[in-house]
Image: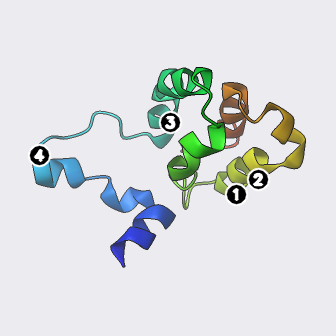
């Protein structure tokens, strides 16, 4: 099933825009992509949405990249659950990602 693979490894869709829309994405760095979503995420948080609900599909965007496991562990760490609806959690978690 392609749906499960996309959830596990969203990078398989990295070139989909090029094939479907004949459009090349200018954001190839996944960390830049995630950080570019911060304003949207903050807007949703202010409306009362939970951070984990907003970022669930982003959790595997760093699949196969150094620091991916630390990224997810930090987000799901129970110590952070008090502040789980804060963009700072995602910002700190993204600091574990080491893209060459």
In the image, residue 86 above or below residue 66? above
User: On residue 73, which mark appears?
Assistant: 2
Q: CA distance from mark 4 to mark 3?
A: 22 Å
Q: Quick one: SS at disc 3?
A: helix
Q: Quadrant of residue 55?
A: top right
Q: Which residue is mark 3?
A: 34
Task: Confirm whether residue 78 shows in the render.
Answer: yes
Labels 1, 4: front one: 4
Q: Quadrant of residue 10?
A: bottom left
Q: CA distance from mark 1 to mark 4?
A: 33 Å
Give the position of the C terminus as an image quadrant. top right
Q: Which residue is mark 1?
A: 69
**For the point 52% across and 21% down, which residue is it?**
43
User: On residue 21, which mark appears?
Assistant: 4
Q: Are marks 4 and 2 in contact (CB under 8 Å)?
A: no
Residue 7 shown left or right of residue 87 in the figure: left
User: Could you classify mark 4 by the number of other residues whose Cα lies within 10 Å: few (under 14), some (14-19), or many (20 or more)?
Assistant: few
Tell me residue 91's x, y (percent).
Answer: 66, 30
Q: Are marks 1 and 3 in contact (CB under 8 Å)?
A: no
First along the sequence among labels 4 and 2: 4
Residue 23 shown left or right of residue 34 in the figure: left
**For the point 54% across and 56% down, which residue is it?**
60
In the image, residue 42 above or below residue 67? above
- Closer to us: 100 or 17: 17
């Amino acid at each position: 099933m392609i749906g499960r693979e996309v959830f596990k490894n969203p990078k398989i869709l990295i070139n989909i825009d090029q094939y479907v829309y004949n459009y090349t994405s200018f954001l190839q760095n996944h960390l830049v992509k995630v950080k570019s979503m911060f304003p949207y995420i903050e807007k949703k948080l202010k409306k009362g949405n939970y951070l984990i609900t907003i970022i669930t599909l982003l959790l595997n965007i760093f699949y196969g990249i150094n620091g991916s496991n630390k990224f997810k562990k930090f987000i799901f760490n129970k110590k952070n659950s008090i502040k789980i609806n804060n963009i700072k959690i995602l910002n700190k978690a993204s600091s574990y990602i080491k893209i060459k």
